[in-house]
Image (spheres, grey):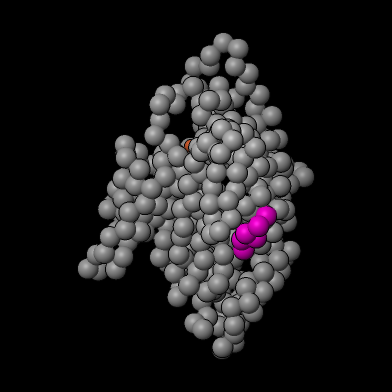
Amino acid sequence: MKTNLSVRPSRRTSTARSLDRMIKKLGAKKGIDVSEARAQLRDKLKELNAKRALGYLAYHGIIDLNLPDGTTVAILPDWHIPAHDKQVSWMVKEWLRDNQPDILIIIGDAVDMFGLSRWPKAPGVIANTQHEYDEVRRMLDEVIRLSGALHVFYILGNHEDRNRRTQIDPNANVSGLIDPNTKEPFLNFHNLMGYTKSDPITFIYGALGEGGMAGGLVVNGDIDFIHGLKVRSKPGQSPAAESDNSGRSVWHGHTHRLGKRSRRTTKRGVIRSYEGGHLSDRRHAYMGYAIKPNWTMGVSKGCVHGGKLHIQLLPILPVTDAGGQRRHAMVDGDKVYKTAVY
Ligand SMILES: [Fe+2]
């Protein structure tokens, strides 16, 4: 098996050097089988987290993540907690528990941050910012525990970026103060949820601390994970436009549409473009801007084989079962996941 195992930031830092040493060590071992490689990845991430060698509870920029064959990944799209679909979220948690992915990628907009939104709020709609931080933290902790993931990569979306736009940027005099407990900048999104460097999660911001359009994750040098910026009207068009721009494969969120395109190019082989849907409740008061959207709920999973991350989009569809009950359903392999009600 080709040994291809690394986790490193794209810039040369002490973190990168530390991770490179890990790669060298693993690369020296020839002929390791998949389970061994995965066990090593697990041990190494644990060790690095324990030593804080990852050194970035938060990272600004692009992280290169190289995973060995056999590594499994689950990708969660725009969740918009606490305006998420509660029934569907229970189903997704069941799916994560069954799948036990090695790596979890959260593509951004996991929290709505309605309380910090500058959009006009309808009378009677309660915005409670503390509740939003509490709810998303609770959900993240739950999915980390249930999924058994070794590490979570949380790419910030434009909704998390509301925190920067409304709290950090206008308060430059105090926004950089360090929280004495977590040692993180006080007003940063991840700090307000109370995460510390010992937690198995990395928050990926843009190079200037922004969310939404800048930071991301590159898996095996082949596919870019970004929250996304481009919005096109038809499912699959937005990531295709992104790939046209970058010449690379991409998985992004942001649009809440679910679709994929692939095409073969002369220089880079097959370029794949995915947008992964959403898990929000479009009837929720926070989603007042969503009028007849062509959104589709879904999750995605992947497995590395031959050095490439192969990805499946799993749509979550409204169905009416034999008894006339309306539900949401998702099929993964031969298992049918269903919500209790619609
Ligand atoms: Fe979103």
Please state the total of marks drawn on the protein image.
Answer: 0
Determine the residue positioned at 66% across, 42% down. Answer: 90
Residue 293 image position (x, y, % from top left): 40, 30
Residue at x 39% of width, y 55% of height: 250
Q: Where is residue 113 in the image (x, y as percent from the top left)?
A: 58, 31
- Residue farthest to the bottom? 30
Where is residue 157? Give x, y as percent.
50, 41
Q: Viewer-proximal residue, 290 or 7?
A: 290
Residue in front for this viewpoint, 244 or 336: 336
Q: In this view, does 241 lie above or below 49?
A: above
Where does residue 24 sit, x and y in percent of width and height? 56, 81
- Quadrant of the drawing holding the C terminus: top right
Q: Which residue is drawn at 53% across and 14% down?
A: 122
| Residue 265, visible in the rendered structure | yes
Residue 40 on the magenta segment = no
Q: In this view, does 335 lie above or below 141?
A: below
Work out whether residue 24 or residue 265 is closer to the camera in this orientation and state it. Answer: 265
Taking depth in this image into account, of 64 and 278 the one nearest to the observer is: 278
Question: Residue shown at 54%/47% (left/top)?
Answer: 330
Magenta segment: 97-102
Q: Is residue 213 left or right of residue 59?
A: left
Q: Which residue lies furthest to the top in this view?
A: 123
Residue farthest along the front direction in this orientation: 322
